[in-house]
Amino acid sequence: MKLTLDNRAVNILNHINAGVLYCKNDEYSTILYANDHFYEMIGYEKDEFAILFGNRFAELVIDDISSILKSIDAHIERDEDLNFEYRMRNKKGEIFWVHDTAKYEKEYDCWYVTIMDITAMKSVEYERERLEFYLNSMPNKIVIYDTDTKVLYKNYSARNCCYYNQEASTLHQIAGESLMGTTIEDILSQAKEGHHVNYETRIQRNERFIGHDRNHLIPIKNIEGEIFNYMQVSEDLLSISDGLTKLPTRDMFEKYYHMHISKNDKVDIYMAIIDIDFFKKINDQYGHHIGDEVIKNTARRLTVILDKEDYICRFGGDEFIILFVDQTLDVVLEKCKYILHAGSTPMVDGNEEIKVSYSIGIASNQSASDYQELFEQADYALYRVKSRGKGDLLYYNNMED
């Protein structure tokens, strides 16, 4: 079959910025006509292509098109147009993607075909898919926000985090209630100035921490230096916390102290060191398994008295430290007395009732110039309590020489 077009039709088709073809409905999609743009796409002259490939369009396709060929009859039967994406190779050996749409002409058993080069779009799509694969492979939780801090994207770890509110649609809803030592407003004021902001969040339920993260809010800028997104990367601190109690380590505790002091140097801070009395005797009498239970139960008792910005760590085998933030001395003393009173309630393990008492030393940044001095004062107050019989508390500034 020979296709004849008048000059006006040819001129119109040659000005279309897409490949326009008229092909047989055979296994090669043999070309009866193609406009100039098609030959520009494939890099062959019209006669050259005819000689080398016999005008067989399918010879240029590098993907397996058997599934397409199998579906053609079904499309014809349903009177549906074809709509496919696949890859082709040009004369230089370069591979490019095309979007193929075709309409069937029943009278001549042929297809009107339009193909567009979508390589650039597919490259962006591929890079996006690859980036998402990388983000989903990371153990850290990653959330991307727009400039109004509305959630645009969450990676696999964030989507499957048990303590994230999965209905949350903003940074405030995700982090606001669990922030420690700062506010959303403070974080955003720094981020909007282009700063990389660090902060901690903590979730507590049933006397235990179920989530504790170190977060980084990173402004994402375009080539002009304008912020168009914020990315929150959250590291799970529970996974690197004390293995027995899931409380922070002493290193995390000290970092939190310095972070808080750097932002709130006028705030009153009290440090309490809590020691389990006669812990070696408990281990010797009941065994290390029971000793571990005593430590875990003590951790739960201490977690109960924490306010939002307070911080706790397991300092050593049978010692804990609490940082009480922006509270009065009376409140701190009442909380510590609660711990002493809690110790009077025996811990029950099976048929065993295990009596536990605590000694507590307390100090304040009102009398200490830095972290080390604050720790030494609290530790000395604890030493004085233990030297005079244990089971009590002492505030460093109230000690008699």
Image: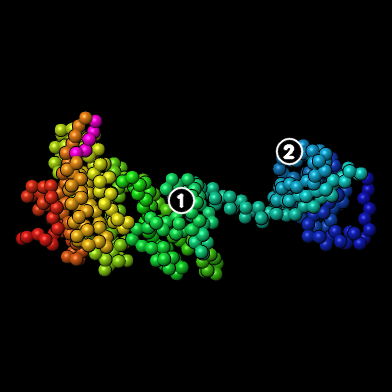
Quadrant assignment for the N terminus: top right
Q: Residue at x 47, y 63 (%)?
A: 219
**Can residue 275 be seen at all in this image of the molecule?**
no
The part of the chain drawn in magenta is 346-350
The quarter of the picture where the C terminus appears is bottom left
Count residues near mark 1 (Cα–Cα under 10 Å), then give few for <14, some for 14-19, many for 20+.
few
Report whether 278 appears left or right of 235. left
Q: Nearer the viewer, mark 2 or mark 1?
A: 1
Locate residue 56 relative to residue 274 in the image: left or right. Answer: right
Q: Amino acid at mark 2?
A: Ser
Closer to us: 60 or 264: 264
Pinpoint residue 297: horizontal percent, then vertical percent: 25, 41
* Residue located at (18% from left, 64% from top): 368
Q: Quick one: 207 or 157, which is closer to the camera?
A: 207
Given residues 253 and 96, the one toward you in this image is 253
**Disc 1 designates what residue?**
165
Q: Secondary structure at mark 1?
A: loop
Q: Which residue is mark 2?
A: 67
Q: Can you say whether 55 is above or below 269 in the image?
A: above
> Does 150 sit above or below residue 48?
below
Horizontal relation, residue 308 to residue 97: left or right: left
